[in-house]
Image: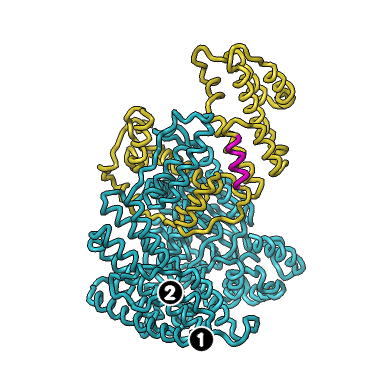
Chain colours: A cyan, B yellow
Amino acid sequence: MYNRRSSYAAVASGSTANTQSHPAPTRSGAFSHLLNSANATPHNLSHNRMSRSIDADGHHSSIPASWSRGGAIPSYSSAGGYWQGLGGSMQDIPPFFVPSYLRGSKHAEKLQEQHKAKLAAQRDYKSTHSSNAGSLSTSSSSVNLHKTAPSHRGLTHEVVERAPVFVDEPAPWPTRWNEGDKFAQLDIEDNGRQAKFSGTQKTHDEAAAVRADFPMPRQCGIYYYEATVISKGKDGRMIGVGFSGPKVALSRIPGWEPDSYAYHGDDGQVFSNTTSGKQYGPKFSTLDVIGCGINFRTNTAFFTKNGHMLGTAFRDLKPNMPYYPTVGMKKPGETLRANFGQEPFAFDIDKMVQDEKAAIQAEIARTRSTHKITANETEFIHLLIGQYLAHDGYVETARAFEEETREEARALANGDDSGLPQGEMVEDLDALNRQKIRTAILEGDIDKALKHTNAYYPSVLRDNENIYFKLRCRKFIEMIRQCNEMTAQFHPVPTPPSKRSTVSTTNKRNSTATDEYDFEMELDEQLGVHNPPPSWDNKDEDEELDDEDDMEENQMKLQQMTQDTIAYGMELRAEFANDPRREVKRALEDTFALIAYENVRESALAPLLETAGRTPVAEELNSAILVSLGKSSSAALERLVQQTEALIAELAEDGGPGAFVNVRRDFLQ
Amino acid sequence: MSSSTVSVSAATPTQHPFQRKIEDVKPSKTDINFVIMDYLVSEGYPRAAEKFAKEANIQLPLEEESISSRVEIRQALHAGDIDTAITKINDLNPQILDTDPALHFALLRLQLIELIRTCTSSASADITPALSFASSQLAPRAATNPDFLRDLELTMTLLIFLPATAPLQKELADLLDPSLRRNVASKVNEAILTSMGARGEARMRSLVRLRHWAELKARVAGKDIPPVLPLGLQDADERSVDSNGNNGEVADVMVH
């Protein structure tokens, strides 16, 4: 927002110096937005370029792609978050962008996820699987192998190459004018961003319109785009900016047909299903930036001109009609350039969306919930928390919480606890067992977890083969982890850490050394269900670490560990080699790839080694045990979150208030 | 809402298409644990928070130095020891009450209620301390704000009805209810948190409200959702119902 503002102002003020070369100096500020000279291109340069293009080409019908794109790119990178780590792999899938006002919205998250999945699928398809390492790597080198021209991360953003290949839920937003949904005499240029009337006008009624590739998604709550009038042509400014349904004829200026809505430049009127307009705003012409937005919550539409809100133009839009951004023109040379959010907007649409969000958040905060059993919110929350803690086997926490809330209740009742619920915590043996299993996994002691699970809940691993598989894989990962940490300690860096020559190794040593101390296993628990490694003794390691004399012994141990790890890996492979499931194969591949690295921590597979990876396995096993006990797999609090997400999604589907709520981002983090 | 009287059992879930959508949501344990931790810390349950950090393998928020003071203040307020609470709040940060007259007034009024409670504990007790506290501490503030004045007047009528010989009217009974102390305590807690730059309200509260709001909105919009959305608090509910000796209506749905 700051970028846009400052650059907008800077360019606007700077441009006044060049009045004579400029047909409409007061509007150059608006035009600068299109140039997007934000903070990369020096202003003079971009301005000169603009003037040159106008001089060279009478009615400057087309902006040379080289500079329009060149100007746009730096601003993407400076705006941050437009391209989230998706550099370099944009050959077949159009680049993904999030309009500024939709950043952080649920819908944007969904689309981004989908885009990532698409990229991953493409990578999967293209990757040669030579070492399997590429499958988890997002580095541009592996991805770009198939490209002809070398490219650099962050510089390959060809703004809009072609329409997305898959149209699937969630609804994508418009990205370009649609070559297949335009009037014949309209030319689409500059990667679909620019529409130009190239024909000659034959009849008075004839016009040329084009729709965008996708309708404005209602799930956005508010959708907004802008169009800049690059040229009003030789003799007119019969230009309409608006939106229309998919079936509206493209041979007429938008606004004249049913389901077609537009703001016209020649008279400043707005039209919907009529050839006689309604007075609305100022006329507009070359270099004006016209914004068009729909608020799907209220089913109203508005326009902006050069960053100024012009007010509500249409009400009672149809709740089920897909509305496509649409522009139309009727004079030769007329040219419009669209911004679907690839660039910062002239109008502060971010604030408008922010205000809408804030109003809804305030409304939510005013809501007071009650519960049938508990008269007030606090008691309800305490019930939820207590049940969650017990359900998920956080035994100690549940006990402490119980005590603390009882103390609270006692104080409230003036020390008289006769009327208090006798919430004597029933010591739940299952909860204790589940706690033990969870703790074992969280400590990386998979064998212990397997042992306990088989002892207490023999059917669980049998009935949940996928969890069994995950645990076995996790054990392999833990073995690699340990080997890795030992290796790191046996090859200490000769230079002191302050010397920068071997920075990465030094860092690695420091970090892993501390990990190692946290990492304690009980040997007596190592009655591994599978192949207990004889020298899997970490207990002594701490004492031996600094002892140079034990170096040799440690080397031996490391060797033994490595052998054990490989043996275990082979056993794992033998056990699951014939498993037809794709995800099993994939997991095996990724897991085995770990062995290829002497130091995994510096490889692309490092995330696999994170201790955070233990938590999901632990939770999955816990849920499976609960199910085997005939209990619900999710606690009431989880169900509450599930219901909330589902309800909000329902409320967002048609652009209702739910569109402005991102449960996870706004409420859970 | 009509749903409020319907009782459902979690054992026989309604197979409504919406149920599928609910089950398709996979909440992250990390998020949920975070919300729990946030609640324990911000609402002041230090021992549970400490245990939880250990058991769930998550970080105990470090910046929470105020947690023990906040717990002490809450305990004082819950016990009706308003004087101590005010002193402790001012020890922590005198700005809090200076900049929030409504909160300060709520505390003083709570103190007045406690005084009245003591003064009227027997028919022969002296009500002078309550009267002088009201005129010296509350009356000057009440003069500045009609809401304060109304609250003060209502509180003073307690003097007439106490000790109660007949059930008090609801407005007055509410003044003596422990939940008033709890509400004031939670406002104080939020004010302290806000004064430290933290988010005042625990996320858990916002979440519970969001859930409620979303259901209300969805019903108003005529969305196709089941008449009740049970949470599965059944076990916990039944236990608390039994021990309270309440009626057996066990509908663990949020009602409106």
The residue that disc 1 covers is A549
Q: What's the residue type where badge 2 is placed?
A: Asn
Q: Secondary structure at mark 2?
A: loop
Q: CA distance from mark 2 to mark 1?
A: 18 Å
Is residue A240 within the magenta segment? no
Q: Residue at x 27, y 51 (%)?
A: A629
| Above-or-below relation of A647 to A3 | above
Q: Chain of mark 2?
A: A
Q: What's the residue type where badge 1 is placed?
A: Asp
The residue that disc 2 covers is A538
Q: In the image, residue B198 lies at what x, y percent?
A: 61, 50
Between residues A224 and A130, which one lies in front from this camera angle? A130
Between residues A422 and B109, which one lies in front from this camera angle? A422
| Picture disc at residue A142 | none
Q: In the image, residue B2 lies at what x, y percent?
A: 35, 31
| Above-or-below relation of A548 to A302 | below
Q: Which residues are magenta?
A: B67-76
Horizontal side, residue A451 vs residue B43: left or right: left
For disc 2, the neighbor class at 10 Å (few under 14, some 14 to 19, many from 20) is some
Q: Secondary structure at mark 1?
A: helix
Q: Is residue A161 visible?
A: yes
N-terminal-most mark, 2 or 1: 2
Q: Residue at x 44, y 34 (%)?
A: A370
Is residue B70 within the magenta segment? yes
Quadrant housing the N terminus of chain A: bottom right
Q: Chain of mark 1?
A: A
Q: In the image, residue A534 lies at what x, y percent?
A: 34, 78
Most common SS among magenta residues:
helix
Q: Quadrant of residue A529?
A: bottom left
Contact, CB < 8 Å: mark 2 with mark 1? no
